[in-house]
Amino acid sequence: MSSKLKTNLEKINLKEYQIGEKIGKFNYGYLSFAKKISTNKIFSVKVIKKSLVLQGKPAEHITNEYTNLLQIYHPFILELKAINTTDPYNLYLFLNTFWVDH
C-alpha cells in the first residue's frame, strides 16, 4: 500500500454521468452506481448530503475519509477517481468499482 497523495483527481461535470439507483445507504448519504455517458464506464459514487455534513462532527469524519482516499493505493480498496463539489446540496465522490451485474 502506498501513501502518496493523489494530485490528479478529475473534477467532473455531473451532466456527463447517469446516476443509477441507490444501492446502499449510510448516515450522511447513499451509494450508487454511475455511468459516464461518453464511455459507458461504470463507477461507484458516494453521494454525501452537504447539509448533514455541515452540522458538526460529520464534517471531520468526511474530511478524514476524503484525505484517506487521496492517499490510499491498494488492490482491495476502491480508488477515488473524481469528485464534484459544485452541486449545492451534495458532494459526489466517484470511485472505481470492482463488480457490476449487467
Image: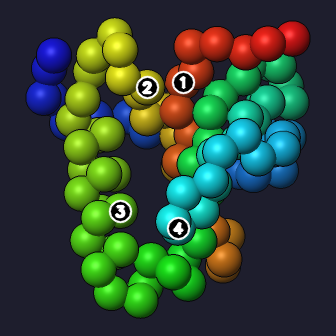
**Residue type for callout 3:** Ile
- The disc label shown at residue 96, or none: 1
Which mark is drawn over residue 62? 3
| Label ID, residue 28 | 4
Task: Determine whether 12 is above or below 6 in the image.
Answer: below
**Image marks 3 and 4: residues in contact by CB distance under 8 Å:** yes
Along the line of sight, the residue nearer the viewer: 6 or 94 = 94
**Residues at marks 2 and 1, CA–CA distance in whole angstroms:** 6 Å
Where's residue 3, x and y in %? Answer: 12, 29
Q: Amino acid at mark 2?
A: Leu
The residue under the point 24% across, 43% down is 68
N-terminal of the two: label 2 or label 4? 4
At which x and y percent is residue 72? 24, 29
Mark 3 is surrounded, within 10 Å at the Cα level, by few (under 14), some (14 to 19) or many (20 or more) other residues, namely some
Q: Are marks 2 and 4 in contact (CB under 8 Å)?
A: no
Circle 2 residue: 78
Which image quarter is the C terminus in? top right
- Contact check, label 2 and label 1, Cβ < 8 Å: yes
Please state, as top left, top right, bottom left or bottom right, where the N terminus lies in the image: top left
Tell me which numbered mark, 3 or 2, is placed earlier along the sequence. Answer: 3
